[in-house]
Image (cartoon, rainbow, N blue to C red):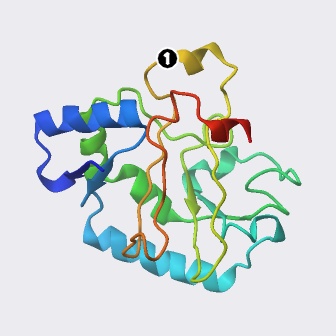
């Protein structure tokens, strides 16, 4: 798989990384998050897992905890039972560490180098600043089923070659094939795959 060093990303490498993202549906860029913020996120998530129980609705895929920014909280709609991020689906709270992640300059620099124009956080409603999903897969837990996060295939915009949604994933622990890293099917965001019919 293609992996790039975020601390020393040249313009040529940035173009290659963007092309890989567009064509294969993912790209690995290491070293984006500075160590102080990484440490703060590790502390926050460790505390979150101690305080929050996993909802029975997501018990087979590990934890699913939504965290929003305090500055976007005023836009938060009333709780709607059964919807992602609400009552019986997963825990939800706000914390300033999400704002730090959203405003992180090194992350924005990578976004600019890759040419991801007009990229903005996607929240639950208009004016929402960002949502962070904290996921934990405990040892010996069941594997997560194959799935796709994008659910707008019937929209004409889905036919564009440019990605309409980009998910930034930061691993707070060293992850490998042995302990359950993310698996992807390259190009399945643009081409039909038998799993799409399941």
Q: Secondary structure at mark 1?
A: loop
Q: Nearer the viewer, residue 169 or 92?
A: 169
Spot the residue most to the front.
194
When the figure is inspected, residue 151 is found, relative to residue 97, above or below; the finding is above
Image location (x, y in percent) of residue 181: 46, 66
Quarter of the image with the C terminus in it = top right
Front residue of 14 and 19: 19
Residue 80 vs 13, above or below: the answer is below
Q: Is residue 197 left or right of residue 17?
A: right
- Name the spot of residue 59 as percent of width and height, x first: 75, 71
Which percent across, then down, holds residue 196? 67, 37
User: Which residue in the structure is indicated by mark 1?
Assistant: 160
Quick one: label 1, few (<14), some, or many (20+) residues within 10 Å?
Answer: few
Name which quarter of the figure residue 152 lies in.
Answer: top right
Q: Is residue 162 left or right of residue 80?
A: left
User: Which residue in the rendered view is the most extreme toward the bottom?
Assistant: 50
The residue furthest top is 156
The residue under the point 61% across, 80% down is: 49
Query: Which residue is at 42% across, 69% downward?
Result: 177
Q: In this figure, what is the number of numbered marks?
A: 1
What's the residue at 59%, 35% (across, down)?
Answer: 193
Residue 157, x across and y down, in percent: 58, 17
Residue 106 vs 173, above or below: the answer is above
- Residue 52 occupies which quadrant of the picture? bottom right
Q: Which of the pair 156/133 is nearer the observer? A: 156
Please tell me in which quadrant of the rendered image residue 50 appears. bottom right
- Residue under the image location 56 percent in, 39 percent down: 122
């Amino acid at each position: 798989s293609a992996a790039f060093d975020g601390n020393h990303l040249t313009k040529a490498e940035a173009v290659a990384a963007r092309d890989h993202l567009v064509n294969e549906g993912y790209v690995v860029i290491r070293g984006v998050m500075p160590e102080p913020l990484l440490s703060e996120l590790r502390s926050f998530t460790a505390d979150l897992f101690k305080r929050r129980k996993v909802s029975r609705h997501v018990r087979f895929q590990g934890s699913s905890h939504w965290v929003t920014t305090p500055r976007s909280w005023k836009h938060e709609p009333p709780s709607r039972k059964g919807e992602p991020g609400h009552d019986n689906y997963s825990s939800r709270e706000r914390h300033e560490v999400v704002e730090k992640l959203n405003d992180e300059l090194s992350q924005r620099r990578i976004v600019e180098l890759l040419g991801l124009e007009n990229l903005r956080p996607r929240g639950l409603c208009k004016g929402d600043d960002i949502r962070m999903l904290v996921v934990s897969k405990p040892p010996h837990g069941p594997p997560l089923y194959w799935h796709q996060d994008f659910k707008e295939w019937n929209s004409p915009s889905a036919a564009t070659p440019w990605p309409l949604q980009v998910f930034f994933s930061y691993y707070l622990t060293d992850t490998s094939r042995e302990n359950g890293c993310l698996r992807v099917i390259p190009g399945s965001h643009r081409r039909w795959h038998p799993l799409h019919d399941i």
